[in-house]
Amino acid sequence: MTNDKNPFKSMEEKFLEKQRAKQAQGDSKVAGTIPPTKKPIEVKKFAKWALVLTALFAIAVILMANIFVVKENEYRVVRQFGEITRIVKDPGINIKIPFIQSVTTLPKNQMVYNVSESEINTKDKKRIIIDNYAIWKITDARKMISNARNIVNAELRMEEYIYSVVLAELGQLTYAEVINDDKDKNNTSSRGDLNDRVTMRVNELLDEGNFGIEVVDVRMKRIDLPQENEQSIYTRMISERQSTAQKYLSEGDAEKRAIEAETDREVTELLATAKKDAAVIHAEGEAEAAKIYNDTFSKDPEFYNLYRTLQSYSKTIGEDTMIILPADSPYAKVLTGYFE
């Protein structure tokens, strides 16, 4: 066979062509007419809808890629060709121009920065190592980006200012005033409101440079001595504490002696006054007793003689006493009951 084509397929195609021709001429009532195929029309509709869906999907993807959400604790910086076009502060949903604008984030909440350790000389020429930390925040994102570029540079500039201010402030205090934060009766420490002064001065320098950041607080974490000076300082501190303790002991001993002397003087005065009052009272009692005796015995002299005689007996006669009395002696007369 020289022809590989299907003869039945060729006949079908010829038949379909005749039917299309008749339909084109308006003869639509011919028996056995087969309507034209709808496959090309359906393919075109499908391609159209596919194109529409693809376009919608691409638009949705582009929109989703260019929508950004601003949170409560952040700034969103919108740039166009590297230049800042706007800074969004309020939380919510925003959109940027596709392929032209970009969005970066800056924190709005307070941050903690550990300042590098540094050696500082006090007023009395003592070297100490100060370790500080700072709590800070961004107040104006546009100024911060314009003058510091990023957070790292802003922290470095803040650290420079903190170091210079702390150096100036501690240079006016002695070593003892720096390490001693005890408060007096007025609730005031020996180094005063050092942290407040440092914070205020650092903020003044940052405002002058328009860095758009604010230091909330600067605090000392640790105060150390250089290793080569540590032992000598400890020795001196021990000596000073011992000297102070001895001073307190001497003052306490002197105060003790003064109190004891004052107490002895008051006791002596009280005893002398008491003895004087007792002597006066005793003398008055003796006088009153003598008066009573005189008034009583003057009423009966004989009874008085008897009473006095009996008193002399009680004083002169003991248990083993032997008395020899003349018959005419007063004792004998009293004992015998004879009275002239």
Image: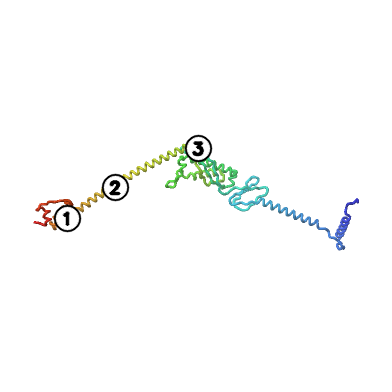
- Residue on which the image places disc 3: 227
Q: Earlier in the sequence, mark 2 or mark 1?
A: 2
Alpha-carbon neighbours of circle 2 within 10 Å: few (<14), some, or many (≥20)? few
Camera-side residue: 121 or 240?
A: 240
User: Can you tell which of label 2 and label 1 is closer to the viewer?
Assistant: 1
Q: Camera-side residue: 62 or 257?
A: 257
Give the residue number, with chain letter if any, for mark 1: 293
What amino acid is labelled 1 in the image? Answer: Tyr
Q: CA distance from mark 1 to mark 3?
A: 97 Å
Mark 2 lies on residue: 267
Q: Are marks 3 and 2 in contact (CB under 8 Å)?
A: no
Give the mark nearest the N terminus, 1 or 3.
3
Q: How many marks?
A: 3
Which three-letter amino acid code belongs to the residue tagged 3?
A: Gln
Q: Position of residue 170 (x, y in %)?
A: 48, 40
Q: Position of residue 33 (x, y in %)?
A: 86, 61
Residue 234 marker: none
Q: Earlier in the sequence, mark 3 or mark 2?
A: 3
**Regarding mark 3 in the picture, which secondary structure is present there?**
helix
Q: CA distance from mark 3 to mark 2?
A: 60 Å
The quarter of the picture where residue 152 lies is top right
The answer to whether 50 appears left or right of 102 in the picture is right
Q: Amino acid at mark 2?
A: Val
Q: Are marks 2 and 1 in contact (CB under 8 Å)?
A: no
Quarter of the picture containing the C terminus is bottom left
Left or right: residue 100 compared with residue 191:
right
